[in-house]
Image (spheres, grey):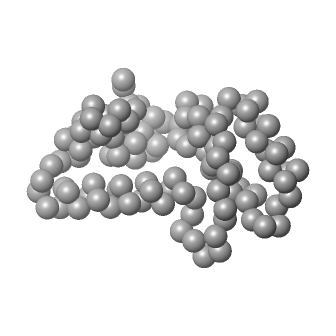
Amino acid sequence: MGWHWASPSNVMKMAELIYTSDTSEEVIHMVEQLCQRFGKISVRVKDVPGDTGYVGNRIWSAIRKESQKIIDEGIANEEDIDTIMRTGWNWPAGPFEMVRGAHSGWSHKD
């Protein structure tokens, strides 16, 4: 069983729980209870052999690729994209701020 914590883990509530057909319901339930004790919101996700990773990471990868494509096409810059996602989609940080924050101890200011 795997547990994906979003960064910064002390702030983000997500607990993506990956399980296989070999994972007992008892183990899944125990980890879900642990998530609750940590104040996390858990979501069960099936593990897929040979897959690219957790659901959140797969979606994040698509967002990063499209964001970079927008920059490469000269449509907008990193700051523009971050501002659009923060103010238009109510994200706590834009995609480029999230990367910088993950590498610097999360420095985004609300």
Q: Is residue 100 visible?
A: no
Q: Residue 25, relative to residue 49: is it above or below?
A: above
Q: Is residue 108 visible?
A: yes
Residue 92 coordinates in the image, percent (x, y): 40, 32
Residue sitting at x 60%, y 76%: 50
Residue 74 coordinates in the image, percent (x, y): 11, 56
Q: Looking at this rendering, what residue extends furthest in the top direction?
A: 110
Work out whether residue 18 or residue 64 is closer to the camera in this orientation and state it: 18
Residue sitting at x 76%, y 42%: 32
Q: Residue 16, relative to residue 55: is it above or below?
A: above
Residue 2 coordinates in the image, percent (x, y): 71, 56
Residue sitting at x 57%, y 58%: 54
The N terminus: image quadrant:
bottom right
Q: Quadrant of residue 31?
A: top right
Q: Quadrant of residue 79?
A: top left
On the rendered structure, is 58 left or right of 25?
Answer: left
On the rendered structure, is 67 left or right of 103?
Answer: left
The C terminus: image quadrant:
top left
